[in-house]
Each structure stands twice: as C-alpha cells, then as structure tokens.
Image (cartoon, rainbow, N blue to C red):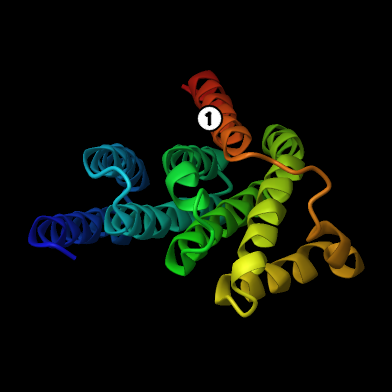
Amino acid sequence: MDNSLHEESVKYMQKSKLISLYLAKKEYSRFLTESKLLNNELIQLIKEYPNTFNAYLIACTVSMTNNEEMAKISEETGDWRYAIEALGCCSEILENTVGPLGSNPEKEKSIQLLILKVRDMIGICCTLSNLNNEHSFSLTQEIMPALVQVCSNLYSKALEHHQFLEACELIRELYKRLFKEQYASLLIPQIRLSIEQMESFFKKVSNITREKISLLS
C-alpha cells in the first residue's frame, strides 16, 4: 500500500472508531448520520483512486463494519429504518466496486473481497426479512431473488479460477443455512449476468432504498 493510501486507511479507521462511540452511548441517530457521511467519503475515495485494489479494500472493510452495526440496531430496537439505511450504503459501495473487482475474477483478492461484500448485503436483507414488518418484508421479497442471482454469478466466476477460495466456502455455508436442501441448485446461476447488469442491479437497490427512506422521513 502506497503512503497516500496508507494515510487514507488510518484516517478512515480512526473515523470509524470515533463514530462507534455514538453506538456505545446508544446515540443511534447520530451513529446513523455519521455512518452515512463516512460511506459517502469512502465512495469518493474509490473514485479518487480508480482501479486501485487497496482503495476498494479500505472502502469495503470500513463500510462493512458500520453496515453490520446499523443492521444490529434494527434487530435490537425493531426500527427497520437502520437496516434499510445499511442496505442502501452497502448497495452504493457495491455499485461502485462490482465493475472493477468483478471484471477480473482471476485476481483472487479482488473477487474474494467482492463476494464477501455481497454476502454482507444478503445478511442485511435477512435482518430486514426477520423484523416482522410488512414494509421491510416486501422490500426483501423484491430484492433477495435478484441478489442471490448476482451472488451465484460471482460465485461461479470465482470457481472458474479459484477452486478453494475461502469466500466460496462461506457462500456455500450461507446458502445451506438459508435455503437448506435447495442450496446446491441455487449456487448455479439461472441467468448469466454481465458486470453491467450487476451494476444496474445495485444502482436499482440504491434508488429503492432512497425512496423507502424518503417515505420514512
């Protein structure tokens, strides 16, 4: 990692730690506001360092931590807004990373990072579906089937080059837990998706979550 990106990494990790203090104080609204601002900064970092793996690594790692915490707030409070915000932040990061990271599946670190981020997004959708809320359930019913297709496509791409990739094993375990005996068939893509189609999907999810959030405001 070059010096400039190392400095960026330290800066964003420190910001994330400071934001987590709001979480510790149960100042959830402030935590949400600051996490969204940080997510926007991470997207700008990606754009500032295009096609630079370490920039994607910083963005995905830092955002993943905050998104998981937002989803946990929904689990604890029953307020589905936090998980929807997490879904939106996650999809915005993926919208900007699926092209650069997914276009070269032969690069082990790139495809692994992308699959882990998609796995994170599936986890957030599962949180939403478990909230026993009509609106959150309908949202996940709309998003989850397509998200599973995207994940299966990336899984298939990865296996072509990396038979024993850790991320692929984690996806198999996730599918077994979610889909039981159907997991093996769902790992095989029903539709072959291009990178452009995947980008379009994450952009669509970003737009949907923004609409849902605006209705809650």
With respect to residue 82, does 185 lie above or below? below
Question: Which quadrant is the N terminus positioned in?
Answer: bottom left
The residue indicated by pointer 1 is 203
Q: Amino acid at mark 1?
A: Lys
Res. 129 visible in picture: no
Above-or-below relation of 60 to 84: below
Query: Where's residue 5, x and y in %?
Result: 16, 57
Instruction: Examine the rendered structure and indicate whether residue 210 appears above or below residue 188.
Output: above
Q: Viewer-proximal residue, 110 or 136? A: 110
Q: How far across and how far down the image is residue 143, in percent? A: 69, 38
Instruction: In this rendered view, identify the residue nearer to me: 19 or 210.
Output: 210
Give the residue drawn at x 55%, y 59%. Answer: 115
Question: Most extreme residue toward the right, as rendered?
Answer: 181
* 41 versus 131 height, above or below: above
Along the line of sight, the residue nearer the viewer: 158 or 87: 158
Which residue is rendered at x = 57% and y = 41% of the image? 80
Toward the viewer: 198 or 194?
A: 194
- Determine the residue positioned at 20% across, 55% down: 12
Q: Is residue 165 left or right of residue 50?
A: right
Per the image, label 1 sits on a secondary structure element best described as helix
